[in-house]
Image: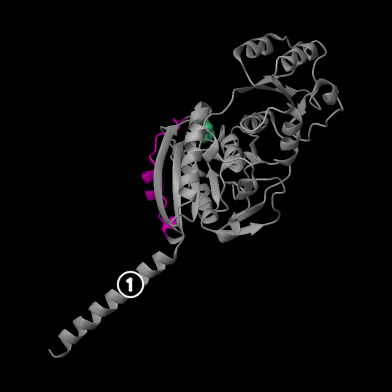
Amino acid sequence: MFFVPRFRAFAAVAALTAAAAIAHAQQALPNVVILATGGTIAGAGASAANSATYAAAKVPVDKLIAGLPEISKVANVRGEQVFQIASESFTNDNLMGLAKRVSALSKQADVDGIVITHGTDTLEETAYFLNLVVRTSKPIVVVGSMRPGTALSADGALNLYDAVNVAASKDASGKGVLVTMNDEIQSGRDVSKVVNIKTEAFKSQWGPLGMVVEGKNYWFRAPVKRHTTQSEFNIDEITALPAVDIVYGYGNVPSTAIDALGKSGVKALVHAGTGNGSVADRIVPVLQKLRGDGVQIIRSSRVSDGFVIRNAEQPDDKYDWVTAHDLKPQKARILAMVALTKTNDSKELQRIFWEY
Ligand code: DAS
């Protein structure tokens, strides 16, 4: 009988010690906030066989976190539901609201990294926007999925696990906004969705920055273009984004779309030309007139890889046009909007397109 009270006391001390050790270990983990915006990663289909037929933006962030208990060993994770939309429906207001929330959280001492769950359709635009305007070196990781969580071989859980691991990693700091998809760590500037129905959907022509395997990051290169803390842009100083739209070049193209956008009051027009950003001869004078009316002309290309060379296919100096460098039209639009919040000088714009 003598041993029972002592054993009970010992067991109580052991339990308290274990609880304290767990609490200490949990305290030692980084703090990661998941901002949820919708998309397929929050999608749900009618059956496991539905990998392409499903409704996006259905599952709330707390359910996404509860469905992935493994992340509690990686970081102290909490979620915020910023939006619940399919990303093809993102607006400039959504972009601004999300970026301002990311910026505010990045200033908090109790936030070590931020994950944004997002639809894959415009994920590349949001990732680039954040890369340009959020002044932090803390890891910001944008993540999506190509299949809903209800589908066979769903990719969202591992993509999200990878994103939390990268966002919790000190070695992910200072690399700009990152995207984790399909085991790869991509630069938010360089990456685009290049396949619409495969899990290996996100590529950069310059390659990924690295890979994440079983929660460990393997880095192979670092970004060279300006981003985050090196940026001259700051979401905290931006109150609105100017209208910038895109027109597409192709055989027999009329000027109808350009005429309409010119009348709509765009501040810049991105021309997604053929080849090296070529412009049809009948379209050149239409763009020159717009330029004369004060609209900036950004010459991009519909071709997936390579980069538009200034004064090659078109006399850009003579026309006072800007070339989009290696940026795809949808990325050129993001940079043009941000740049126009600071300057409307075409030579300054061209510098910005070289540097970002
Ligand atoms: N509609 C797509 C989107 O929300 C679904 C997805 O792939 O995330 O971007």
Q: Quadrant of the C terminus?
A: top right
Residue numbers of the magenta segment? 54-72
Q: Residue at x 57, y 41 (%)?
A: 234
Kind of residue sitting beneath label 1: Ala
Q: Which residue is mark 1?
A: 20
What kind of element bears circle 1?
A: helix
**Which of the colour schemes (rainbow, by chain, secondary structure, one colour) is used?**
one colour
Tell me if residue 44 can be seen: no
- The answer to if 68 sits in the magenta stretch is yes
Report which quarter residue 302 is drawn in: top right
Q: Residue at x 45, y 43 (%)?
A: 35
Observer-nearest of 41 and 101? 101
Question: In the figure, is residue 65 to the left or right of 103?
Answer: left
On the image, the x and y values in percent for residue 169 come to 55, 59
On the image, the x and y values in percent for residue 183 come to 59, 50
Question: In the figure, is residue 94 to the left or right of 196?
Answer: left
Tell me if residue 340 can be seen: yes
On the image, the x and y values in percent for residue 213 come to 58, 57
Question: Which residue lies most toward the left here?
Answer: 1
Observer-nearest of 78 and 15? 78
- The answer to if 260 sits in the magenta stretch is no
Q: Is mark 1 within 8 Å of ligand 1?
A: no
On the image, the x and y values in percent for residue 129 come to 59, 37
